[in-house]
Amino acid sequence: MVSIIIPTYNRANLIGYTLNSLRQEFHPGISIEILVVDDGSDDGTEDMIRSNYAHVIFLKNRGKGAPAARNTGLHAAKGEYILYLDSDDLIGPGYFKEKITLLEQTDLVNACYGEYDFFRSDNGFSESDIIFKHKYPLIESEFESELHLVNNLGGNYIPPNAIIWKTYLLKKIGGHDESLLINQDVDLLIRAIFNGLQMRGIKDGTKVYIRSHSLDTRVGAIANSTNKLRNMIDLRKRIYADLVKYKFDTPACLLALSTSLFNLWRSTRNVNRQIADEFLQLSKEVYWPVEIKGNIVYRALSKLVGPVKAVELKYSLLKRD
């Protein structure tokens, strides 16, 4: 059985599209349960679901946030496999069939993911709503845990909506960390890697369609939130310690983490200098120097005077212009 866990909050106008997309996913030999975990909606979400989707298991998780809602769903789930969906995303026809078949046939693979598109719409979906965004590569081997780790440490993330997990692995790592204010899905995947994740990308012509909103998780949008920035640096300190603990402290992993920290310093240095300096200090501790991306002059300047001075010189010149 596949347990589909959908946290929601005031999405009465959109969650119906999500649930309707799942109606076409009932394949012979694959049973599905849908768990909607409501975080205290006051827009009629509960009445709408109970009236129109009697097969949906409706759970309440008042005001505890999305990570806690996902954990509530995980504890209640009866399936051997888990998919987390947001309450405005859509599953394309046939997304489960080949992936569940693979997971059933091998003990070696304990998660898989497929292709996806982002779209922007205030209601339903059409092909014309698809927008271009950078996508995570489809890695069709389960023996690339370090590559997944490097990608995620460096800020190249797999959308959690595209991953189907074996339930035992999620329960082994305790589900989502409810203490985190941000980066909960990244943390989940990284902890899974430390605990034996072997994940295969599957290209079978099916997709998840992820609704795009203005993101509140970008550094530019959270720079004024000291608590979230503090959460981000504390998480990365823990990840650094775990890289050493689980023997993933390879040059590639350390460089990816250090570069991510350096970029966080660069993004926050003019907004919250104290925490920005902590990002930079940890970056230097993890792996130094980092490699700056940019044109040949900028990269040459970085090698000559160091990445920190190169950034400061660049922005000093831009201000003069």
Image: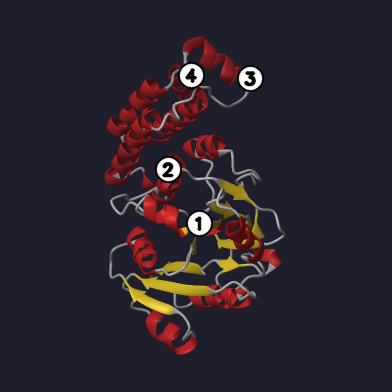
Q: How crowded is mark 4: few (under 14 residues within 10 Å), some or many (20 or more)?
A: some
Q: Distance between the residues labelled 3 and 1?
A: 42 Å
Nearer to the camera, 38 or 225? 38
Locate residue 181, reporting x and y percent.
32, 51
- Earlier in the chain: of badge 3 and badge 1, it is 1
Which label number is shown at residue 310?
Answer: 4
Asked if residue 119 can be seen in this view, the reply is no
Look at label 2 and name its amino acid: Asn
Depth check: 225 or 181 in front?
181
Q: Residue furthest top?
A: 304
Q: Residue at x 55, y 74 (%)?
A: 31
Above or below, comparing residue 288 to residue 35 in the picture: above
Seen at 67% across and 68% down, the residue is 94
Read off the residue under disc 2.
Answer: 195
Please say if the residues under marks 3 and 1 sit with CB atoms less than 8 Å apart. no
Badge 3 marks a residue whose secondary structure is helix
Q: Where is residue 33 in the image (x, y as percent from the top left)?
A: 49, 74
Side of 252 relative to 26 (left or right): left
Mark 3 or mark 4, earlier in chain: 3
Which of labels 2 and 4 is toward the front?
2
Amino acid at the residue labelled 3: Ile
From mark 1 to mark 2, how far is it between C-alphas? 13 Å
Type of colouring: secondary structure
Mark 3 neighbour density, 10 Å: few (under 14) some (14–19) many (20 or more): few
Q: Which mark is residue 165?
A: 1
Mark-to-mark CA distance, 2 and 3: 40 Å
For mark 3, what is the residue?
296
Looking at the image, tell me whether mark 1 or mark 4 is earlier in sequence order: 1
Amino acid on which the number 1 mark rests in the picture: Trp
Q: How far apart are marks 3 and 4 (CA)?
A: 12 Å
